[in-house]
Amino acid sequence: MRYSFFQKILGSIFNCGLIITVGISLFCSKTDPSVNDPNWREESLKLASGICNKMVECIQESKSWKNGNAIHRKFIESRLQEANCKEYHRKTNVYLLKGNSPEIIQKVTRDCHKEIISMTCNQIIQNELATNKSCMLMEQIQGGIVIK
């Protein structure tokens, strides 16, 4: 099955986990306590911002993006703006250190961020995030799955 450029970008965004991971936090248990760690919250906001910036860089480099549907383009660009990215991230299990060991959440998040930042835009557009172990684990954490 051949996917359009927008399907690939949306797939990458949703698979990423941080941003990308639009709406996943809705599945989180409301009774699961979070850990208040101000240092981690500051660091994780920087990581989320870095991921959003990488996504913006990649979609803006793409010729298909420039020629694509204006409504999709505006929606995705709006979602990835730094303020919106951070606002969404503040509601996630990663930011709240919720549902798993804080050490696991932090390691997985740092590893996923490192992988995303080191990927080429072509790799991101081809949805290689979907096969990246650390990013897949981060997505599971965002969805409320306990990682051991």
Image: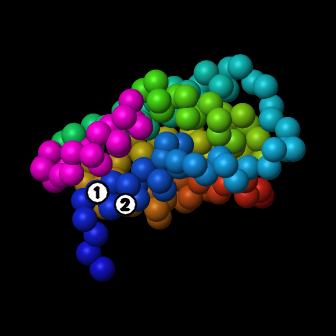
Residue ID at (81%, 44%): 30
Q: Position of residue 145 (x, y in %)?
A: 73, 58
Q: Is residue 34 left or right of residue 47?
A: right
Q: Residue at x 59, y 25 (%)?
A: 43
Q: Where does the image place residue 6, in percent across and percent down from the top left?
A: 28, 57
Q: Residue at x 32, y 37 (%)?
A: 77
Q: Quadrant of the image for the N terminus? A: bottom left
Q: Which residues are magenta?
A: 62-81
Q: Position of residue 71 (x, y in %)?
A: 27, 46
Magenta: main secondary structure equals: helix
- What is the crowding at mark 1: few (fewer than 14 residues within 10 Å), some, or many (at least 20)? some
Q: Residue at x 87, y 44 (%)?
A: 31
Nearest the viewer among 42 and 144 is 144
Looking at this view, name the residue that lies furthest to the front.
Answer: 71
Badge 2 amino acid: Asn
- Residue that numbered label 1 is attached to: 6
- The image shows residue 139, relative to residue 45, as above or below, that is below
Quadrant where the C terminus is found in the figure: bottom right
**SS of the residue under disc 2:** loop
Checking the image for residue 20, the label placed there is: none
Report, in whole angstroms, how far the alpha carbon at label 1 lies from the one at label 2: 11 Å
Q: Which residue is mark 2?
A: 127
In front of the other: 62 or 70: 70
The answer to whether 131 appears left or right of 2 in the picture is right
Count of numbered badges drawn on the protein: 2
* Residue 103 as seen in the image, left or right of residue 3: right
**Residue 147 visible within the image:** no
Report if the CB atoms under discs 1 and 2 are less than 8 Å apart.
no
